[in-house]
Image: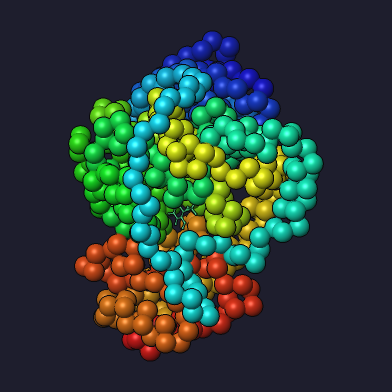
Amino acid sequence: MTTWANPSGSGTPTRGGGDYDLLLDLAGQRTRAGLEEALRAAVRDGRLAPGTRLPSSRVLARDLGLARNTVADAYGQLVAEGWLTARQGSGTTVAPRPAVPAHRTAQHTPEAPRCGPAELAPHHSGLPYVLWPGSPDLGSFPRTGWLRAARRALTAAPNEAFGYADPRGRPELRAALADYLARVRGVRTDPEHLVVCTGYTQGVGLLARALHARGARRAAYESVGLPDVPTVLRAAGLDARPLPVDADGARVAELGGDVAAVLLTPAHQFPLGVSLSPARRTAVVAWARSTGGIVLEDDYDGEFRYDRQPVAALQALAPDHVVYAGTASKSLAPALRLAWLAVPPHLLDAVVREKRIADHQSAVLDQLTLAEFLRSGAYDRHVRRMRSRYRARRDRVVEVLRGCAPGVAVSGIAAGLHAVVELPADAGPADAVVGRAHRLGLSVPGLTAFGASPTRPPALVVGYGTPPDHAFTHALSLLCTALRDAS
Ligand SMILES: Cc1ncc(COP(=O)(O)O)c(C=O)c1O
């Protein structure tokens, strides 16, 4: 449904005092989500230019026949995502934003040299109880649904699916992903610009080598983060530079013009759990635009946000400068080794070339199964079920720690599968708690395991995805014992 919101009520569009006309296509969805999408579309299409003032929430609500809170909440969400800006006294305006060139279809080019394998950091120590971040509940893998999807996919697969094929991955999966990513994460791409890869980790290597082959020499990564990332960047021949992270996410103002790419976890910083602030989302897009730099957006747990609407992918603000990366490692299982990159047109050939050199293509049968799993709605159902389970686990972590260790501060819990547990100021180093937990049979990391400087307040990173249900309560009680003993 297209709504012509004319706030004057007289049939004559007027301007001033927050009364603005606005043509919005609500596409039949008279909901907050429908309004948000209509506003995003209007900004994206250029119908709402940067700097345009929007009607006040009161006026727009009246014109659209929506509750005022619905409009105010939609505005708030789009401010958080960087589409709009809100300033006291001057209302809500469209945020400054780079122009987005149209996508084009891939043309593949010849190979280039690459480096050898990276030495990767171990994930954890194999004790009976594990509260490490980074893994979903492996016992909840949807075995029956996956089997059903695999049977259907295999039955329907054409013979050519069993041969050597497009390094970008199966067209069925790329089509299903393009639809899913647009619907759920606001990603702006199409099947032609998706590259299925063997986990995010391979995706980092592909992009790093593609950039290096084009003359890039330096990449920045979040100074507190996934330990493998700088290793993979260096293996690709890049100078990897840490970028400090604070409560607003990565300090993107410290990116220099000599940096070719920056790797970020905007929705839910890993492992600190903060999201990249609206101002920094805008700033990093401006940086990319002015320097020609590339942002690699690691949306590793974008599906698991608990307390409010997810912040849409940064990629939607600048599809020509942001490579969006998603993975099945949190939503389904790391063992699938299935991830995907949405690649800007000008980088596609280079990334596809690296994928072909790396392994020609990711394993096809699981790609076909995932395509069927997505298409049938089983993926959405699984994610929704897991979201409510993880949310319950998160609440349990908070409740148990409040009871047994009231001096700790738990943060980073709005999303994802882990929490940051900051120890009281007088508690001493987190290593004492980690060591004590280890002796009790519980593996739980300190923040320093993710590159945090020892000068940061001591903290643990507690993953709550991993333990099977029957072991979860005991794992938490071991954590409590370790916290108590260490203090
Ligand atoms: C921050 C972050 N990004 C991405 C991933 C997923 O990596 P992969 O797709 O290679 O399993 C992980 C897994 O631990 C992670 O912690």
Question: Which residue is located at x 39 percent, y 72 percent?
Answer: 445
Residue 271 vertical position relative to residue 213 in the rendered view, above or below: below
Report whether 58 appears left or right of 458: right
Report whether 421 appears left or right of 478: left
Question: Which of the colour schemes (rainbow, by chain, secondary structure, one colour) is used?
Answer: rainbow
Report whether 107 appears left or right of 120: right
Q: Position of residue 53 (x, y in %)?
A: 40, 24
Q: Position of residue 247 (x, y in %)?
A: 32, 55
Screen quadrant of the C terminus: bottom left
Question: Which residue is located at x 43 percent, y 66 percent?
Answer: 123
Residue 267 vertical position relative to residue 28 in the rendered view, above or below: below
Question: Which residue is located at x 78 percent, y 48 percent?
Answer: 151
Residue 262 vertical position relative to residue 3 in the rendered view, above or below: below
Question: Which residue is located at x 70 percent, y 50 percent?
Answer: 381
For the residue pair 151 and 458, the one nearer the viewer reads as 151
Report whether 438 appears left or right of 372: left
Quarter of the rendering containing residue 430: bottom left
